[in-house]
């Protein structure tokens, strides 16, 4: 047998899984559903070790050996022989949302479960194993133990604030079942010691290991089930005068109709489109962690292929194969299924931003536009006008070629109108200053205003043909506009407006380009070809050679390696299941029948051509149906009651881990990839605000190539002065590493003007001093002349005289106040708790008796002299011991 021992982060509570290895093809897993303490699990393993040792007659050796240490189970998979278990063996923290850590999978291990004595070998097993392992789990797969990554922040926090009466009626589980490492925040009951925790079912569209967990989902406790997403996750720190604001970007790639660029186009029969990615930007004040007490804001947008039956034939070996419509769909059946999914998840309005070409000499991209307009027009006939789908066509390529038009200015206008219609999510009501001095744009904002803040209703759906380069730039502009509203809602800026070339926008642009590069590699096989700088027309000449290299890389990937990648994705997601006696995966001429289930079986009763939405969706619009309180949604929730002293709901211990030895260098907030300190000017005299527009020579960002770590950056700075001009970035970006958190884009426009730091050997002291001594203008922001002007000297003399007279009056007050008050002497009344407070002396305030007693008790405790405990202290300690050890 294999024994899997899992623990909570504090290693105080354990569960044990037993996996039978005597079955050659079946998976037999036993979960005893019991929660063990550390002592109990040691005794259990000791008994197993002793029993197996005596049974096998091995007195000298151990009867129980550790096979592997892991951080979670990805799932169980079977090809033609027995089952394998896939374990996460390495992880890296990528982001933190309210104390909930998000990890990237760094390495995995596949272990064959059946024993060698019962193994039934098959000649094709090794080939299937190799195809399955072609899906690199160490490349952009993410998980979290306590945060639901498949849902948006708005969903997670809306569910958390469900009415208490609803939760009480739903609590049906026993005390034994109430242990759950998933929950570390809940809702306090009124006046009682109980706390309710809520666990929701994941949104399976964005879960990539759902099929791998299918075999054990009902057999084991849900704490064993770890759901992973695929896409991108990055977090950067925005420092606003020392106040930490975390900007997080999470992209969830759909697992339905997933695949590579030319092999997956359009939609399948169930309304799932190719290259569908939901991008969410989360902004929160990191100085307060808790979801209930902190300030959190998010904005969601979507990209995805045009929801029609269309494809491109790559057998012709053309760079741009012709677009063909595969099936006629006069009643927009698949488009209706797709938009019905979006209405359920996001509410209304759904806004389509279509960026494909409108004017072409030979009809190519325009075919898609014409069909999409016809489908949207047909579907809108039956929706109420206030909830109609909004269609915005804009030929981005045509505007880019024009020298008179500014592409990003036009995109900014579209972004403003979109964010005003959909609104955004924030979990706190409007601040008092914005009520007193409301901004004009703020009053026009859409969405749904509730007592606890604002909800986003509706979503922007952006598409071009590939949904890569043009789409990423458009999404960046909409995200930048939404970021300004988010910062304004948290009281961090005075107007909801952000300008280019500020530290905040540079930081956000770099985050979005990492996001675009990662998604482009997953779907298209290369990084982005056209970036934000390309559309701003400030990209350096070296960027053009890089664009050519990325285009060639994309073409090579599409022509030669996409078919193998598609087979791996189909096997990993369970779209194809190997079966004895049936054709193998590599023998299939196409995977069309695997993704279109209506070709393999009789279709279910068709949806109405006029009432094309799910019943109940229209009643709750503009709110998304998934977030309203109804019986259907309640069935997706598991509600449990905790005691308020239990560890599972103590977010402080979960985040800060006081029981572990840690160092500042390993702290996530210090090791974060991007921060505004990388972009801030190094000169002291310049305004450190991240919302100040910088000149190219003021930026503190080193631009000498890609920086995968800080040591490389230092090395580049050292060699910059003596080295030849830096090479173009394709030499760096062509490496095989695709690490979502470390890809950084060149600030090419700046690299032409930035001054390198010259560092020489320690023996050459004269050259060092030449570079170390800086002008006063660089240090203080002003030039200090030799002799001050007469006006300045006069002002300074008056300031000194004022200080001297103030000092005399203070001394006179001390002498005369006891005798008789004089009307001519100015009495200054202190407005703070400091009775004496001026430039000469400060009288600290008096502390009250209780504060002094607390302070003395604290000092005595440090010396080992403990104060006697009171009755309340005994009760609290008794509750803690009972919940932890009993």
Image: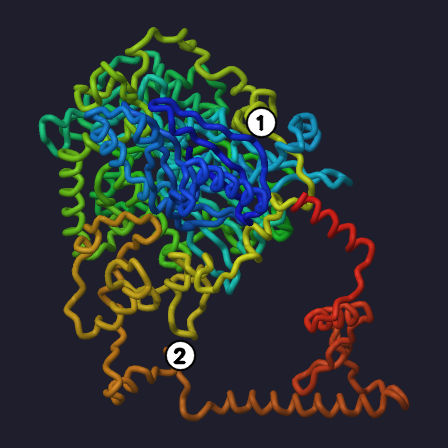
Q: Is residue 848 left or right of residue 38?
A: right
Image coloring type? rainbow
Would you call the spot at circle 1 few (<14 residues within 10 Å), some (14-19), or many (20 or more)?
some
Q: Where is residue 870 in the image (x, y as percent from the top left)?
A: 82, 58
**Which of the image's four quarters has the C terminus?**
top right
Q: Quadrant of residue 181?
A: top right
Under circle 1, the secondary element is loop
Q: Mark 1 or 2, which is nearer the eye?
A: 1
In the image, is residue 685 above or below residue 349? Answer: below
Q: Which callout, 1 or 2, points at the residue further toward the start of the chain?
A: 1
Residue under numbered circle 2 = 779
Label 2 CA crowd tier, 10 Å (few <14, some 14–19, many 20+):
some
Alpha-carbon distance for marks 1 and 2? 57 Å
Residue 413 visible (yes or no): no
Q: Nearer the viewer, residue 166 or 298?
A: 166
| Image location (x, y in percent) of residue 106 | 34, 47
The quarter of the rendered structure image containing the N terminus is: top left
Task: Determine the residue located farthest toward the right in the rendered image.
Answer: 819
- Residue shown at the point (72%, 38%) measured from the top left: 189
Q: Which of 591 and 546 is in front in this view?
A: 591
Q: What element carries label 2?
A: helix
Q: Which residue is pictured at 44% across the width and 21% down the height?
A: 340
Q: Quadrant of the rendered structure where residue 58 is?
A: top left
**Residue drawn 19% across the image and 50% down it:** 734
- Which residue is at a point 36% across and 36% down the rendered structure image? 86
- In the picture, the disc for residue 190 is none
Q: Where is residue 492 in the image (x, y as percent from the top left)?
A: 53, 55
Q: Position of residue 835 (x, y in %)?
A: 76, 78
Up/down of 66 relative to 608, above or below? below
Label placed on residue 628: 1
């Amino acid at each position: 047998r294999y024994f899997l021992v899992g623990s909570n982060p504090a290693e105080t509570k354990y569960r044990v899984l037993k996996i039978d290895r005597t079955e050659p093809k079946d998976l037999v897993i036993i979960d005893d559903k019991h929660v063990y303490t550390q002592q109990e699990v040691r005794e259990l393993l000791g008994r197993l070790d002793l029993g197996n040792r005596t049974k096998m007659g091995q007195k000298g050796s151990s009867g129980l050996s550790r096979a592997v240490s892991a951080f979670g189970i990805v799932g169980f998979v079977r090809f033609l022989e027995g089952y394998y278990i896939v374990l996460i063996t390495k992880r890296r923290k990528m982001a933190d949302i309210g104390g909930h850590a998000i990890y990237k999978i760094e390495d995995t291990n596949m272990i064959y479960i059946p024993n060698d004595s019962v193994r039934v070998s098959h000649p094709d097993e090794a080939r299937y194993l190799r195809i399955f392992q072609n899906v690199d789990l160490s490349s952009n797969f993410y998980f979290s133990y306590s945060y639901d990554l498949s849902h948006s922040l708005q969903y997670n926090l809306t569910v958390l604030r469900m009415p208490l009466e609803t939760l009480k009626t739903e609590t049906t589980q026993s005390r034994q079942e109430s242990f759950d490492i998933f929950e570390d925040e809940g809702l306090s009951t009124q006046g009682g010691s109980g706390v309710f925790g809520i666990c929701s079912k994941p949104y399976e569209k964005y879960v990539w290991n759902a099929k791998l967990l299918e075999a054990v989902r009902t057999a084991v406790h849900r704490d064993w089930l770890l759901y992973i997403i695929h896409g991108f996750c990055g977090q950067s720190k925005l420092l606003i005068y020392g106040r930490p604001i975390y900007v997080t970007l999470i992209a969830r790639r759909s697992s339905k109709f997933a695949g590579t660029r030319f092999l997956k186009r359009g939609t399948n029969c169930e309304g799932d489109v190719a290259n569908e990615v939901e991008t969410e930007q989360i902004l929160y004040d990191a100085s307060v962690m808790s979801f209930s007490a902190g300030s959190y804001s998010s904005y969601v947008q979507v990209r995805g292929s045009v929801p029609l039956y269309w494809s491109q034939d790559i057998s012709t070996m053309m760079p741009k194969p012709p677009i063909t419509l595969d099936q006629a769909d006069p009643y927009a059946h698949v488009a209706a299924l797709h938009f019905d999914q979006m209405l359920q998840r996001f509410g209304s309005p759904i806004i389509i931003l279509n960026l494909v070409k409108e004017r072409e000499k030979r009809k190519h991209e325009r075919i898609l536009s014409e069909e999409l307009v016809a489908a949207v027009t047909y579907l809108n006939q039956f929706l109420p006008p206030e909830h109609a789908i909004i269609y915005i066509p804009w030929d981005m390529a045509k505007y880019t070629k024009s020298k008179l038009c500014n592409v990003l200015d036009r995109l900014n206008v579209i972004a403003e109108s979109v964010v005003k219609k959909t609104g955004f999510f924030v979990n706190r009501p409007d601040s008092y200053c914005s009520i007193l001095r409301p901004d004009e744009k703020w009053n026009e904002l859409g969405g749904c205003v509730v007592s606890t803040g604002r909800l986003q209703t509706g979503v922007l759906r952006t598409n071009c043909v590939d949904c890569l380069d043009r789409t990423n730039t458009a999404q960046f502009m909409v995200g930048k506009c939404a970021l300004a509203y988010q910062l304004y809602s948290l009281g961090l800026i005075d107007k909801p407006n952000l300008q280019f070339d500020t530290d905040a926008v540079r930081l956000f642009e770099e985050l979005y380009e990492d996001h675009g590069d990662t998604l482009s590699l997953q779907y298209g096989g290369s990084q982005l070809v056209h970036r934000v700088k390309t559309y701003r027309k400030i990209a350096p000449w070296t960027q053009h050679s890089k664009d050519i290299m990325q285009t060639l890389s994309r073409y090579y990937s599409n022509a030669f390696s996409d078919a193998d990648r598609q087979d791996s994705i189909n096997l990993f997601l369970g779209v194809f299941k190997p079966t004895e006696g049936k054709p193998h995966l590599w023998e299939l001429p196409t995977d069309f029948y695997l993704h279109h289930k209506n070709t393999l079986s009789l279709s279910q009763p068709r949806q109405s051509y006029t009432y094309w939405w799910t019943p109940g969706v229209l009643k709750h619009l503009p709110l998304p149906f998934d977030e309203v309180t109804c019986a259907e949604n309640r069935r997706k929730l598991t509600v449990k009651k905790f005691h308020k002293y239990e560890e599972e709901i103590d977010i402080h211990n979960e985040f800060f881990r006081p029981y572990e030895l840690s160092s500042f260098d390993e702290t996530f907030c210090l090791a974060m990839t991007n921060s505004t300190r990388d972009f801030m000017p190094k000169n002291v005299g310049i305004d450190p605000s991240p919302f100040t527009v910088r000149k190219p020579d003021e930026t503190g960002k080193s631009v000498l190539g890609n920086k995968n770590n800080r040591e490389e950056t230092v090395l580049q700075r050292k060699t910059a002065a003596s080295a030849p001009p830096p090479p173009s970035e394709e030499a760096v970006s062509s490496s095989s590493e695709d690490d979502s958190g470390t890809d950084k884009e060149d600030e090419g426009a700046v690299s032409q003007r930035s001054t390198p730091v010259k560092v020489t050997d320690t023996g050459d002291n004269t050259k060092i001093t030449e570079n170390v001594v800086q002008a006063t203008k660089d240090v203080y922001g002003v030039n200090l002349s030799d002799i001050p002007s007469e006006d300045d000297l006069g002002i300074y003399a008056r300031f000194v005289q004022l200080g001297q007279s103030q000092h005399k009056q203070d001394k006179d007050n001390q002498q005369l106040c006891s005798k008789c008050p004089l009307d001519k002497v100015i009495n200054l009344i202190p407005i703070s708790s400091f009775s004496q407070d001026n430039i000469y002396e400060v009288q600290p305030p008096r502390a009250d008796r209780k504060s002094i007693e607390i302070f003395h008790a604290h000092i005595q405790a440090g010396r080992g002299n403990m104060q006697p405990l009171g009755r309340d202290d005994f009760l609290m300690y008794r509750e803690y011991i009972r919940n932890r050890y009993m």
